[in-house]
Image (tube, helix red, strand yellow):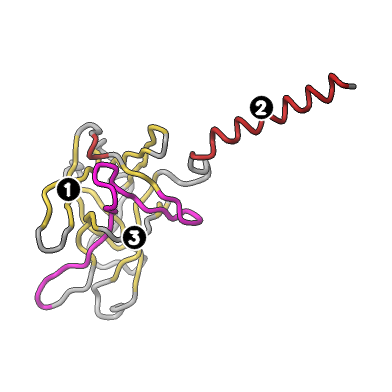
Amino acid sequence: MKQKLLLSLLAIIILLACKKENANEQPTDLRASGFLCTIGIKSNEQAYPNPDTICVGSNSSGTSYSIRDYSHTAIGSFVVRPRDIWTLETTGDNNWYLKNHMGKYLSFEDTPYPVNDEYSIDFDDAPTEKSVFLRSHNNGQNFYLESKFKRGYFLISRAANVSPPDPSHSAIRFQKKQQLWFFMP
């Protein structure tokens, strides 16, 4: 009887130790690939100023991006599979790489725009210290992407600053504010 009690206690301790080891990992049911989306603003007259789902698209060589409308009423370019599919790859310890369909890694470009205290993005052929992100899980499938290279700067979509005013989101940057992202399958 004493042996059974000790074995049961040992099994519970081992299970708790294993569970504690995995406490810092992201839940396994989070999507890690698909169309990289966020909430933006359409630029067409019928929808303005209603927010809508926008995607980060990619060109066929994977060396540049554009912001595209995900909705069925999209004006302009549409998202296309597999060209616009992005994947988050983890190296463990909540370190993530964001990779496009051509295997290019989205990276932090450390030349700031002096007025906005914002940083641009770059694409690298292989992961570097500037392409590591911390993924903060909010709820459901939503998450924030923070640069590990320059902590406190998050991936965001930014509205165009053109004349006449165009409120549509036209760029992705790193700024000190957070913006939720999610993957559409």
Residue 160 x %, y %: 17, 67
Disc 2 crowd rating (10 Å Cα; few below 14, some 14-19, many 20+) is few
Look at mark 1 in the image and give the residue it sits on: 64
Q: Quadrant of residue 115?
A: bottom left
Q: Secondary structure at mark 3?
A: loop
Please provide the residue range marked out in magenta.
136-164
Residue 183 x %, y %: 40, 52
Q: For this view, does 62 lie left or right of residue 98? A: left
Look at mark 3 in the image and give the residue it sits on: 179
Look at mark 2 in the image and give the residue it sits on: 14
Residue at image point 29% right, 52% down: 152
Q: Is residue 146 magenta?
A: yes
Inter-mark Cα distance, 2 to 1: 49 Å
Residue type for callout 3: Gln
First reached walking from the N terminus: tag 1 or tag 3:
1
Query: Is 154 situated above or below 168?
Result: above
Residue type for callout 1: Ser
Residue placed most toward the observer, 64 or 13: 13
Q: For this view, does 113 lie left or right of residue 8? A: left
First reached walking from the N terminus: tag 3 or tag 2:
2
